[in-house]
């Protein structure tokens, strides 16, 4: 028998070239510095100079703090009073029957402050006023940081001179802890309000919250910021 045919060597299969996979960079998370920067208030800038500095805030830091320290004998800089926040509150009892009243109040507060107001709701039922718990009855805005200083500047420089028969702000509206509350009869005194679009005239309460702890210290702080109190020569800032 003839020898078995020699087996031919199998041809090696050519390996197909592997497709190149381009590496896509994963989105980089925020660095620690960026996270800290995002957490800072709007009036604080880690790089300095990128945000406009409110005029009254600079006046407080450069002039008012030193004056109050000399006047009241503060030895620790943390004892010097400062303005913490400004609260604007509008009560709209008619909103329980007409929702458009509350919408107008919210839009006007937003125009005055540049910040979205918070709607306040009744906490309990009051039968004499036809109120039920949870019904919207007003709106309020709490200003801090740069918006607080800018609102105070506009309020003293532009809004207060528009008061009718103005003879100075009353000095008996402090609460015993250095906080000052005043009432405004008409929202039309604010230049941001368009007279032709106003349907209902309403007032509001404005509270200036300080860290003074005493009325005389709180009054001195607001006076140095330019608040024109009755019977006193206003400080020109």
Image (cartoon, rainbow, N blue to C red):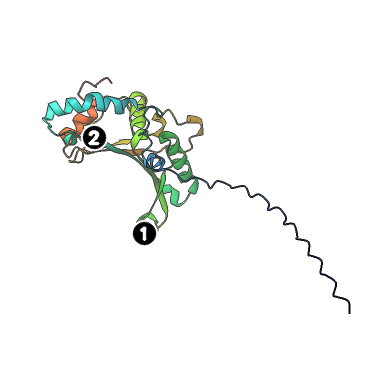
Could you classify mark 2 by the number of other residues whose Cα lies within 10 Å: few (under 14), some (14-19), or many (20 or more)? some
Image mark count = 2
Left or right of 115 on screen, residue 196: right
| Foreground pick, 13 / 125 | 13
Q: What element carries label 1?
A: helix
Q: Mark 1 points at which residue?
A: 127
Which numbered circle lies on residue 224?
A: none
Crowding around mark 1 (Cα neighbors within 10 Å: few <14, some 14 to 19, many 20+) is: few
Residue 235 seen anywhere in this rendered image of the structure: yes
Q: Can residue 226 be seen in this view?
A: no
Asked whether the residues under the numbered discs 1 and 2 touch, taking CB atoms below 8 Å apart as contact, a structural biologist would say no
Residue at mark 1 to residue at mark 2: CA–CA distance: 42 Å
**Residue 170 vertical position relative to residue 122 in the rendered view, above or below:** above
Q: Earlier in the sequence, mark 1 or mark 2?
A: 2
Residue 39 is situated, as x and y percent measured from the top left of the image, at 38, 42
- SS label for mark 2: loop
Residue 1 % position (x, y):
89, 80
Quadrant position of the C terminus in the picture: top left
x and y percentages locating residue 216 in the rendered image: 15, 33
How far across and down, in percent of the image, does residue 234 sit? 24, 22
**In the rendered image of this protein, does residue 94 appear above or below residue 158?**
below
* Residue wearing tag 2: 82
- Taking the spot 31% from the left edge, 36% from the top edge, the residue there is 183
Q: Which residue reaches farthest bottom?
A: 1
Q: Residue furthest left?
A: 73
Q: Nearer the viewer, residue 137 or 154?
A: 154
């Amino acid at each position: 028998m003839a020898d078995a045919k020699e087996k031919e060597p199998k041809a090696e299969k050519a390996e197909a070239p592997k497709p190149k996979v381009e590496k896509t960079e994963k989105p980089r998370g925020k660095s620690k510095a960026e996270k800290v920067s995002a957490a800072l208030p709007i009036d604080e800038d880690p790089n300095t100079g990128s945000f406009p500095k409110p005029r009254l805030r600079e006046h407080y830091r450069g002039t008012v703090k030193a004056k109050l320290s000399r006047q009241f004998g503060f030895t620790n800089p943390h004892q010097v009073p400062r303005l913490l926040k400004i609260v604007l509150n509008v009560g709209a009892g008619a909103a329980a029957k007409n929702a458009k009243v509350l919408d107008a109040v919210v839009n006007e507060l937003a125009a005055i402050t540049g910040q979205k107001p918070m709607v306040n709701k009744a906490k309990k039922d009051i039968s004499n006023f036809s109120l039920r718990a949870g019904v919207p009855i007003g709106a309020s805005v709490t200003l801090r940081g740069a918006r607080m200083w800018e609102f105070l500047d506009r309020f003293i420089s532009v809004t207060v001179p528009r008061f009718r028969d103005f003879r100075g702000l009353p000095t008996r509206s402090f609460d015993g802890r250095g906080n000052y509350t005043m009432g405004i009869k008409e929202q039309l005194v604010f230049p941001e309000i368009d007279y032709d679009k106003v349907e209902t005239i309403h007032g509001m309460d404005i509270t200036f919250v300080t860290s003074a702890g005493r009325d005389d210290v709180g009054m001195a702080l607001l006076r140095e910021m330019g608040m024109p109190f009755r019977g006193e020569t206003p400080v020109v800032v």
